[in-house]
Amino acid sequence: MKKNIFTLKFILLGFTAGLINGLFGSGGGTLLVPGMFFLLGIEQHKSHATTISVILPLALISSFVYMTQGMIVLDVTLKIILGGMIGGYLGAKLLSKLPSYLLRKVFAIFMIIAAIRMVFSC
């Protein structure tokens, strides 16, 4: 019974992250990292790393839907991908060097700043 509840938590967390990713174009990671850490008890570094691997299929599905609806600006996308790949590589290397308490604080500050900007932007 306990294993079924634990599996249901994974599926519900994934469903919610997919829904947020589909609605907002991203954002599943802001739910998955704390969800894995607080709800599932997965260590901080592993939560971040696992989230990245989960976001790829979510982004592919959402991108396909957006593309079929003509909502993607392809030339902008390609330029951002280049910088994103370099940043992603460096960020992944840096992840293993940050202590958990600092990683958690940096992530929280990033989320707070993003939330404030979204609430107060016109």
Image (cartoon, rainbow, N blue to C red):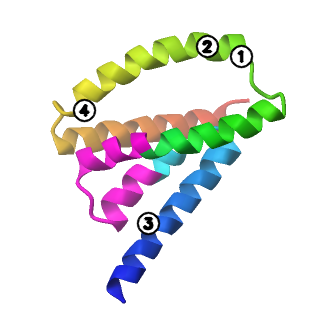
Q: Picture quarter containing residue 89?
A: top left
**Mark earlier in primary sequence (1, 3):** 3
Regarding mark 1 in the picture, which secondary structure is present there?
A: helix
Which residue was labeled with disc 4?
95
- Position of residue 98 measured from the top left corner of the image (x, y, whole percent): 18, 33
The answer to which of marks 3 and 4 sits earlier in the sequence is 3
59 with respect to 89 (left or right)? right
The residue to which callout 2 is attached is 78
Span shown in magenta: 32-53
Which residue corresponds to the image point at 70% horizontal and 36% vertical from the top-left? 64
Amino acid type at circle 3 is Phe
In the rendered image, residue 38 lying in the magenta stretch gets the answer yes
**Which residue matches tag 3?**
10
* Residue 94 point in image, percent of width and height: 23, 26
Q: Mark 1 points at which residue?
A: 74
Of mark 1 and mark 4, the one earlier in the sequence is 1
Say whether residue 107 is visible: yes
The Cα atoms of the two marked residues, 2 and 4, are separated by 25 Å
Q: Do the residues labelled 2 and 1 touch (CB within 8 Å)?
A: yes
Measure the alpha-carbon separation of dots 1 and 4.
30 Å
